Amino acid sequence: MANPNAYSPETWPAAKRAAKAVLRPIERFLHIEASSGIVLLLAAAAALFWANSQYAPAYEHLWHTPVRVGIGSLSAERSLHFIVNEVLMTIFFFVVGLEIRREIFEGELADRKRAMLPAVAAIGGMVAPAALFLLLSRPDTRSGFGVPTATDIAFAVGVLALLGKRVPPALRVLLLTLAIIDDIGAIVVIAAFYSKGIVWWGFGVALIGIVGTFVFQRLGIRRPIYYVIPGAVVWWGVYTAGVHPTIAGVALGLLTPARSWFGEEGFVSAAEEAISLFRKRSSDPKHTAHDLIEPLHDLRLARVEALSPVVRLQTSLHPWVAFVIMPVFALANAGVSLKGINFAVPSVKAIGAGVFFGLVIGKPLGIVLLSFIAVKLRICALPKGVRWSNVAIVGLVGGIGFTMSIFIAGLAFQSAEALAAAKGAILAASGVAACLGLIVGRAVLSDVPNPLAATSEHQAESSAEV
């Protein structure tokens, strides 16, 4: 979001005031940690209302609108729903890949001991819901076992954010790391169980795109725009091979360099050199604007390369993913016609029960139980400041499947009735899991004060007294 105080000299004063009035509240909202979850919830609610209103035919017609891309005979036509689920969600998975790459390089996944507990918890949080779904399923519904295994990181983190400062920092890190490993598991599930018939030459095409990416990196090409072409080749190759194309986004994210070119020290040195050259040339009475281009270019290069491509891309794409792509996905996929769900049909009942109980019961049960066993066997240990009651909260909010669960449901079920039952159960379970997480969180964390928060409050009270 641009700074509302920074405007060009030609800007009309009335426009400045209007921009400040509009942008400042928006900026404050976007900086709230739970805001992306709020936007996602509003989009899902709008889709649900739209699909069950008198305008339901317009909802269906909108997402089946054909979209043509290309020139002449080289063009391809797909529905708007395809563009959202197969193309835009590839960007979502690309950001997931970037997050995994960064965590492996310098985050929680870089340290095996720190990653052990979230990894064990994530495995338990996938196996238990899948097992519970299979236990409640019928032979014709077992393909949906992967639906309740996923966790929606935006909603889950948003629920913790609503609990405020009472949440221990280590608990939030545990949830974030668990959700990242959970995403890795979901990616494996999608690639292994929800791919169509394999067309092997498609992997050859994807390999060409991957090799092109490596070649560009070796040539020192750093601008992301140049990687769109090899990235598109990887996407088309994976799509042609019969694997869901969003896997291409994950692969490209994992291939993104995690080391910065200049780094912090290099940035300071290069920036000081560029500023020194700028001062020298600008102090010359005969200088022209053209003389200042070189030091400004060097300064821009130093600024850009102070951070690694992984961090830069993740930072720049995250707002688009959180506030545009995910809400659009929710709007396109959460529109479930409740009239079309007949739970008297055994298969529909089995799907609804398997997904709902898998998320609400299976998730927390698997996360807490396997974590407890691993800690007792001394495979890993609880982080400092985290209790078992805290882990239970993580398990409850882990039952918020939403985005990834809806995505997997679309791959698992082909019939409209089965898909509607799965989506309806996902929405209901995610709502129940969020409420349980908030209720238990307020009850359990109320007597676990955050020392930093307590210190801040004490200082504020002292300042007020003075």
Image (spheres, rainbow, N blue to C red):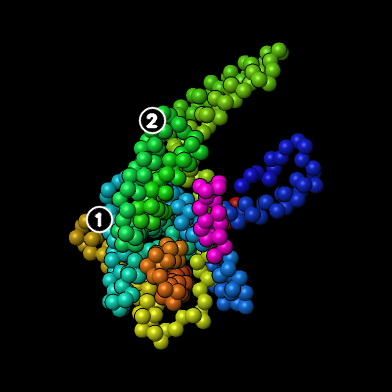
The one nearer the camera, 141 or 402, is 141
Instruction: Give the residue pinned by disc 2.
Output: 218
Query: In the image, 360: left or right of 301?
Result: left
Q: Is residue 18 magenta?
A: no
Instruction: Give the residue pinned by disc 1.
Output: 380
- Residue shown at 46%/27% (left/top)? 266
Position above or below: 219 against 374: above
Tag 1 secondary structure? loop
Query: In the image, 392: left or right of 15?
Result: left
Magenta segment boundaries in residue numbering: 64-80
Q: Earlier in the sequence, mark 1 or mark 2?
A: 2
Query: In the image, 358: left or right of 68?
Result: left
Which amino acid, mark 2?
Arg
Estimate how packed mark 1 is, as few (under 14), some (14 to 19) or many (20 or more) residues with alpha carbons within 10 Å. Answer: many
Disc tally is 2
The one nearer the camera, 161 or 62, is 62
Query: In the image, 171: left or right of 272?
Result: left
The one nearer the camera, 185 or 34, is 185
